[in-house]
Amino acid sequence: MSRASLPNAVDQIEEVRIDTDILIIGAGNAGCFAAIEAKRTNPELKVTLMEKAHIDRSGCLAGGMDAINTYIKKGRTIEDFVRWSRSQAGGLLREDLTISMAEVLNKPIEEWEDWGMPIKYEEDGEEYKTRGKWDITISGSEMKIILAEKTRESGCEIINRVVATNYLMDGNKVIGAIGFGVRDGKVYIIRAKATLIATGGSAGLYKPYQNDGNDSHHQLWYSPFNVGTGYAMGIRTGAEMTTFEMRWCATRTKDFNGPIDTISVGYKTPMVNCKGEQILKTRYAHLGGDEAPRFIRANLPMDEWREGRGPCYVDTTHMTPEQIKDMKYDYLNERPSFVLFLASRAQDISKEPIEIYGSDPYIVGGHTASGYWIDVKRATTLPGLYACGDVAGGTPNKFVGGCAAEGLLSAKAAVEYVAGVEPGKLNEEQIAREKERIFEAGFRNKIVRDGVKPREMEERLQRLMDEYAGGVHQFFRMNNEGLQYALRHIKILKDQVKYLIASDLHELMEAHEIIDRLDVAEVLVHHLMYREETRWPGWQSRADFPEKNDEKFDCFVNSRYNPETGEVEMFTRPYEQIIPGDR
């Protein structure tokens, strides 16, 4: 399929104007559940769902899943879940948000099963099959297709292949969004009484360790098409953000960057170093062993490498042939190409263990607490704007089930909100400026043709972040001088946006993706600099402040970009404990 061409001038850009009650940006897991719940709560409302890709295979679930990592099983309580999540997050999470999410956590998963997603059961046929304390196993290769079909059946309006670029504002109030069609080149101006942002987290800020050219450009663990647009739109508009410094850096299969919980948790294969030592149960038993927080487990292979005991593996050599067959089947539900990866290397994992290494860092609020600062109804600090899923902050360890639950909560709040508001007034000057900004790189390409391509700027950002802001090649470590260097050069890159060129609509989308990544990276570096301690080794390792400092940093680090000054303002908010237990 040939790429769509760009218009030659602003006056050639066709506009599509839509009025709706609720606009949902992002048709991934959280966005789809939000759309379904909004229509279910009030069928009379017009709900519009805007997606950069296509709803059938968009978002983190595009390739499927083999497990749901958060489900409150029989015999466990919400209080148990909060205590566990708090321990996994190093003692820092929004307990009010975690409790409200946990109250509806099981509902979307059970609905998914009713709609046709296979969930595995224990032999008695009564309880879901477990994988760890909070995980249940599924056959989820088609889970997104199933969810997309139910979203269509809900009656909401779905607009595929439209890239959101900025919110529409009436004063400080969000009244919708503007974007462009990546296939038709039209500008979409969607006015809404309430707007839900559900665009996912941010990948591609850092250079992946296996990035050796175009073939591995998208060989990431997290969805490479989730670039942080939802964060960036909020940042540019002055929304309050929280805990970006709590990055997600995971242990992954080396050279493929795939998940290892399927192997290590599902089949209880130990993590070992090159000496054959079981890392968690022996050398790091004092940190909790198999119950160690996720940030500890993510950092272990890196520590072993630095101390001369790498490479590291998940030891599959004791798995039975039946277990190996079942494990490969599990991967066909989530990362089918991993089975091909093993075959291409002729690797017999009963004789040769699977090597593991750290991933490049991601900003993803479904795993950590990074994202918009929200209240218990999932309202952001911008009136009219709600956030759910990976883009919403404060609630680590949400994963698939929790992101879906937040979709339900944000939709209910938005339906309540729109009952008492009138449509905002569109600012035609803002729309005209944004149309110019959207197509600027394309217009420039028709004149100069020798500017900076989006891929070139992306690679510069990734190398900069990797080397100076705690990337995988630096074993996730950083210091103030390196972060200051990163910040200076991010500002240079932001100034060089005026040289970006795009030859077609797809490349124009990539131009806006790198613009969004730059805005997210700038805020991230400010967060990393501000927290002068090491609270999450691996996720956030300050070489110049290696110890934890509860007296100063037992709190949330928040930020707000000031559109008038162009500066990022940093401040803290206190922790509020609701559920008793250790912190």
Image (spheres, rainbow, N blue to C red):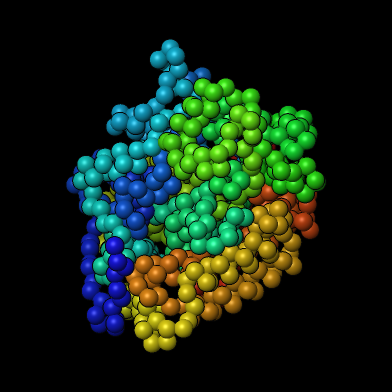
Residue 530 pos. (x, y %): 68, 61
Q: Nearer the viewer, residue 314 or 567?
A: 314
Seen in the image, is 16 located left or right of residue 395?
left
The answer to whether 1 appears left or right of 355 in the picture is left
Displayed quadrant of residue 171: bottom left
Residue 271, relative to residue 528: is it above or below? Answer: above
Position of the C terminus by quadrant: top right
Residue at left offset 54%, top offset 75%: 494
Query: Where is 26 relative to 505, above or below?
Result: above
Depth check: 507 or 403 in front?
507
Location of residue 263 in the rendering, given as x and y in whole percent from the top left corner: 57, 32
Which residue occupies the extreme top position in the image?
A: 124
Could you tell me if residue 22 is visible in this image? Answer: no
Residue 217 lies left or right of residue 571; in this view the side is left
> Residue 440 is drawn in which quadrant?
bottom left
Which residue is pictured at 64% across the width and 24% down the height? 318
x and y, in percent, of residue 515 in the image: 48, 69
Nearest the viewer among 193 and 162 is: 162
Of all residues shown, which one is farthest toward the bottom?
A: 447
As drawn, the residue found furthest toward the front would be 346
Residue at point 31%, 68% (across, down):
3
Vertical arrangement, residue 226 with respect to residue 304, above or below: below
Which of the pair 420/390 is nearer the observer?
A: 390
Residue displayed at 69% across by 71% down: 485
Q: Can residue 270 be seen by looking at this rendering? A: yes
Quadrant containing the N terminus is: bottom left
